[in-house]
Image (tube, rainbow, N blue to C red):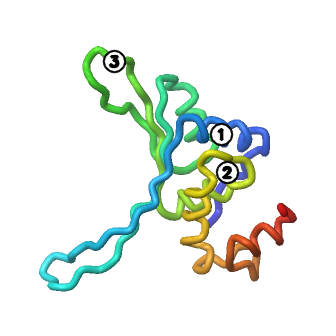
């Protein structure tokens, strides 16, 4: 997966925003295919950040070069909100960027990374969060 390079100072700023205003969805549920009797496991994997500052949301989408952004529907009489969100493999990409810097959302970010790590085999031979930490000299 090739994404543009993001400056570390931007990642640190985004991690702070994300810890304060963001959310991580990592849920498994059973789903039934149309015409099938059996249910199968499906995951909802999504990162989302919503706020009233449109320019920050726009900058976030441009900086990360993934996900979608737009106006979020809010109750009448409330300030307009803007939301950026990404899912699945884009969420994995962003989670890997934010992981060294998030504090509040760390557990959920690690769930997203661990979900995809065996499939993507991070940094050559790394196949678990522990190995990722060791490979990146983060412990």
Which residue shows up at 34% across the image and 76% down it? 41
Q: In the figure, is residue 5 to the left or right of 90?
A: right
Quick one: label 2, few (<14), some, or many (20+) residues within 10 Å? many
Q: Residue 76: percent from the left, percent from the top?
A: 25, 19
Is disc 1 placed on a helix, strand or loop? Answer: helix
Residue 82: % across, % down: 44, 30
Q: Which residue: 47% across, 34% down?
A: 50
For disc 3, the marked residue is 78
Q: Residue furthest right?
A: 137
Residue 100, compared with residue 88, is above or below; it is above
Seen from the viewer's position, the closer of residues 96 and 63 is 96
Tag 3 secondary structure: loop
Tell me which corner region of the image, top left, top right, bottom left or bottom right, holds residue 134: bottom right
- Reading the image, the residue beneath label 2 is 98
**Cα separation between marks 1 and 3:** 25 Å
Query: Which residue carries the number 1 mark?
Result: 14
Q: How many marks?
A: 3
Query: Going by the image, does 108 lie left or right of 11?
Result: left
- Dots 1, 2 in contact, CB < 8 A: yes
Mark 1 neighbour class, 10 Å CA radius: few under 14, some 14 to 19, many 20 or more: many
Q: Residue at x 64, y 41 (%)?
A: 63
Q: CA distance from mark 2 to mark 3?
A: 30 Å
Question: Residue 107's spot in the image, x, y percent?
Answer: 60, 57
In the figure, 111 relative to 66: above or below?
A: below
Q: In screen coordinates, is 22 left or right of 32?
A: right
Q: Which quadrant: the C terminus?
A: bottom right
Give 136 or 103, whichever is nearer the viewer.
103
């Amino acid at each position: 997966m090739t994404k543009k390079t993001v400056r570390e100072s931007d990642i640190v700023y985004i991690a702070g925003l994300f810890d304060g205003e963001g959310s991580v969805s990592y849920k498994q549920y059973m789903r039934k295919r149309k015409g099938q009797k059996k249910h199968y496991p499906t995951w909802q994997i999504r990162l989302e950040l919503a706020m009233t500052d449109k320019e920050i949301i726009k900058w976030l989408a441009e900086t990360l070069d993934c996900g979608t952004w737009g106006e979020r529907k809010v109750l009448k009489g409330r300030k307009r909100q803007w939301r950026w969100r990404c899912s699945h493999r884009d969420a994995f990409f962003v989670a890997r960027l934010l992981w060294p810097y998030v504090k509040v959302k760390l557990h959920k970010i690690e769930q997203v990374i661990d979900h995809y790590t065996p499939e993507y085999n991070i940094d050559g031979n790394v196949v678990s969060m522990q190995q990722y930490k060791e490979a990146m000299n983060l412990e």
